[in-house]
Amino acid sequence: MTNNDSNAIAELHRIFDAQRAAYFNQPEPTLAERIDRLQRVPAMLASRHDRVVEAMHADYGNHPALTTTLFDYLAVFERAQQALENVEQWMQPDPRPLPDALYGSSKAYIRHQPKGVIGNLSAWNFPFDISFGPMIDMLAAGNRVIIKPSEQVPACGEAMREMITDAFAEDEVAVVTGGLELARHFSTLRWDHLVYTGNTRIGREVALKAAENLVPVTLELGGKNPVIFTENAVTADNVRKVLAVKITKNGQICINADHVYVPFEQRERFVELVRQQIADWFEDFTLSDDVCNILNRRQWSRLQGLVDEARDHNPASVIELGTPANTDNGCRMPFTLVCDPAPELGVSTTEIFGPILPVYSYVSLDDVIGRIQAGERPLGIYMFSDEPEKIERVRSRTSSGGFTVNCVALHGAQSNLGFGGVGHSGTGRHHGIEGFREFSNPRAYLELADDARVEPLLGPHREQTAEFIQQLMGA
């Protein structure tokens, strides 16, 4: 372990201890205090638009400014506004009914209490949104927060550290930056809750480390999100909707379309519509400044390996739209279709996370459902159809984190719609009230009134209890 790693880990422990002490000193911030902290988020961002854009561009080599502004800047504003408008309502006790005969005028309710100090291991693809978005839910719930940005986006991590340091006291919110040793150590602390966003392999490691301290986790992972077209849905407009999301961040989005199912008779039409749309948008997809770089050479090599494997297996199945892949001007590659790849190939078995789109032709919709059921549950399932019966058949016979009809991934863009996975695609939810509840302890509260008659429930259990049981069983 290097001195830098040791120093970063020592700094993490120091801040963690300070936040724990602050939490125990004030376990439940008032509504006014929570609003004050939430209001600091848009104020923190307001003068730093250029800083965010520059940091993203520095880490990627090329990252379109409009994409950054939309998803890593304005999206955080929206989530902060959503929390500010609703936190008072979210904090209200949730009353539960009691049997009048036993409890009289007694009161029972759930009160959402802050969990304490929460760690957030955020991802590199939306570094600001994935760091600050869950932080907003955590602050609304009254928690203290420590964020560890991905070491793969150091410029963004440093920008976040500066922003948070200026806006928050260290015992409220802090950002710690460092390499892999810090990332590995982060999940060994006794957090009150831990969030990790990234791939399933690392998510499993994080969950195992957290389990040693019985730390609850929210895991935002990934998966192979399918897009299903029914017969009449293979239209230019629908194909455009899929591609408009697939090309965003060059496919490096966890809820992006991973692969597409099209009716057998429609496969060639689908391929031609993709060709036309990419040609309409880009003179050369590989070289366009409107296309985000693949993050780094490691990610580029992984993606190129998937294409090479598919080409070696069946050269005719690979269709590249753009000049050949290169790393001369950043990590670039063509938009690539792989038609009906074999099930054992990497494009069929691993999450793609890039500008590669496998296209599978099918005869029976039930076959598609069977293939989805046979795999791990994805983060999203997307269906293009104007046939309600078929939509409902797919929805009711599959499981995923989200299900979206006639668009791709937009469920994840809604600040008031709980977002998360299921099974290997993740556990837990954030965004809106689901995020508030995720980072709260739903504490049961019972206040017994003088007119309560609960003696049959209390020991020693004798004649009065026997009569009560007889009444219940008779009813």
Image (cartoon, grey):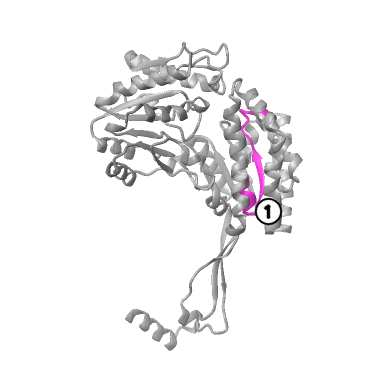
State the image coordinates of residue 252 (x, y, percent, origin top left).
Answer: 51, 28
**Residue 475 lies in the magenta-colored region:** no
**Residue 144 lies in the magenta-colored region:** yes
Residue on which the image places disc 1: 34
State the image coordinates of residue 441 (x, y, percent, origin top left).
Answer: 58, 58
State the image coordinates of residue 218 (x, y, percent, origin top left).
Answer: 53, 46
At horizontal 41% and vertical 35% (from top left) the residue drawn is 225
Range shown magenta: 136-155
In the image, 414 versus 403, the foreground residue is 414
At horizontal 60% and vertical 34% (from top left) the residue drawn is 72
In the image, 269 versus 441, the foreground residue is 269
State the image coordinates of residue 104 (x, y, percent, origin top left).
Answer: 51, 81
- The quarter in which the N terminus is drawn is top right
Above or below for 340 versus 473: above
Q: Secondary structure beneath disc 1?
A: helix
Residue 244, visible in the rendered structure: yes
- The quarter in which the C terminus is drawn is bottom left
